[in-house]
Amino acid sequence: MRFPSTKAKVLLVGGTSETRPAAEALLAAGHDVLVSQATDVELDLPGDPFLEVRRGRLDPDGFRQLLAERGISHVVDASHPFAVELHRVLGRVCLELAIPRIRYERPASRHPPGVEIVPDHRAAAVAAASHGRPILLTTGSRHLEPYIEAARRAGLPLFARVLPGEESERACRQAGLPPRCIEFARGPFPAEATRALLRRWDIGVLVAKDGGTASGLAERLEAARDHGAAVVLVGRPEPEPGAALSFDDVVRRIADPSAPNDLAPEPNHNQRGKPRMDPLTHAQRSRKLQEIQRRKMSQATGEKGLLIVNTGPGKGKTSAAMGMGLRIAGHGKRLAVVQFIKSQATAERNILGALPQVEWHVIGDGFTWDTQDLNADKATARRGWEQARKHLSDPEVAMVILDELCVVLAKGYLPLDEVLTDLRARPAMQHAVLTGRGAPPGLVEAADMVNEIQAVKHPFRAGIAAQAGVEF
């Protein structure tokens, strides 16, 4: 068991390369870790009950609220060297809330002779186009426009290797980069993988950012040299003074109040090992959180029918949906429930289904590993959807719960486009709640609210059967 003398609740904001080793070092030191990542890219993280992950970009108010609500004691900023604005935001917010911030800087790279180093992306675009040869970007999807404009003016082919994911796809689409010119892949890449890409597109200029050794820059430079391609490198921003240069140093700074941080942590701790917050600091944080909440509440004045998705491998997706259904029924409003996949009614139907304002349909043949008949499963899903459509077109129905529909869509039993078309056409104030594992990306993008429920622990793994009142 872990009983460190200075147990901390750490928010780890890391780049793709740093997050896992940073998390491992912090967990090994006995700290609780909350990883915050801006994108939906699945990182290779250790499976540890003291590790949590949240996804999505945050503005300053978002960070303030996260730090205050989650009781964060330290922030480790191991984000990409080029995320300069993020560094500034974290520094400012941590200073406001009196939370120590530790900046980690990844080791710098050594550059071979002949590499052209420029100060920013606009200069890199001009330099790359000046060679008059096809260009490959390995700088990510956030700064495509200057390169596309420079290549267009010079009449040159432009290609890009970017991370897979909805955000990258959307950025490429909005910038006007054709799909045939994009390689969606996640590094780190060996030199041979980049060499193959250079040969495939007959690349004459490779553009990269000086992201340090962890970014795989050395392998890209090696591939460009072997292929005979010129290299244009966007120079690395100046490292932050006093930054930690190793994860051991990060851990030491959390444990040692005299170590350099943006803000020295308080030396006294409570009985649980958490840093004790003095009354003034607590009041300051509470007032800041109150300001944020009141401002957001004053701005949130609109109402609409919500498309809500409960997905993920954890238990509770249907339970959460039924809780919302109970609220709707409690307000005296009409509720419709259509259960796909499941062939037997669960206990919640005994209560909700008995109410006069609730209509309930169980239209499933059981688990697909029991039915073993693809055509029959598709036909059953179709029957369920025809029933759901009737409720989705009825303005008197305040909420429609489509239980396990995400599974139906993930398995291709119903066309996603058709389902989304019907969902978009429902009455303006009608809520639709979809549950099930494997929600398709298109559904996630269309939804107003998406809840991903994770399985940290489950009794089934310990040989404990499903039990009445818990699972059904």
Image: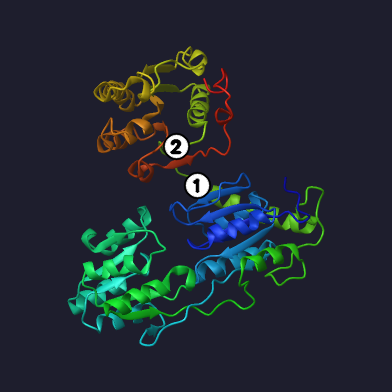
Residue assigned mark 1: 300
Here the colouring is rainbow
**Location of residue 430 with respect to 286 vertically, above or below:** above
Residue 82 visible in the current orientation: no
Residue at 51%, 57% in the rendered image? 58
Residue 205 found in image quarter: bottom left
Which image quarter is the N terminus in? top right
The image shows residue 246 at horizontal and vertical percentages of 61, 69
On the picture, is 43 further left or further right than 21?
A: left
**Location of residue 299 with respect to 395 vertically, above or below:** below
Residue at 35%, 44% in the rendered image? 441
Mark 1 vs mark 2, CA separation in Å: 25 Å
The image shows residue 244 at horizontal and vertical percentages of 63, 71
On the picture, is 17 further left or further right than 144?
A: right
| Tag of residue 311 | 2
| Tag of residue 452 | none
**Location of residue 235 with respect to 313 vertically, above or below:** below
Kind of residue sitting beneath label 2: Thr
Within 10 angstroms of label 2, few (less than 14), some, or many (20 or more) residues?
Answer: many
Residue sticking out furthest to the bottom = 113
Say which element carries label 2.
strand
Q: Nearer the viewer, mark 1 or mark 2?
A: 2
The image shows residue 160 at horizontal and vertical percentages of 29, 66
Kind of residue sitting beneath label 1: Ala
Say which element carries label 1.
loop
Residue 73 visible in the current orientation: yes
The image shows residue 405 at horizontal and vertical percentages of 37, 30
Q: Which one is in front, 43 or 74? A: 43
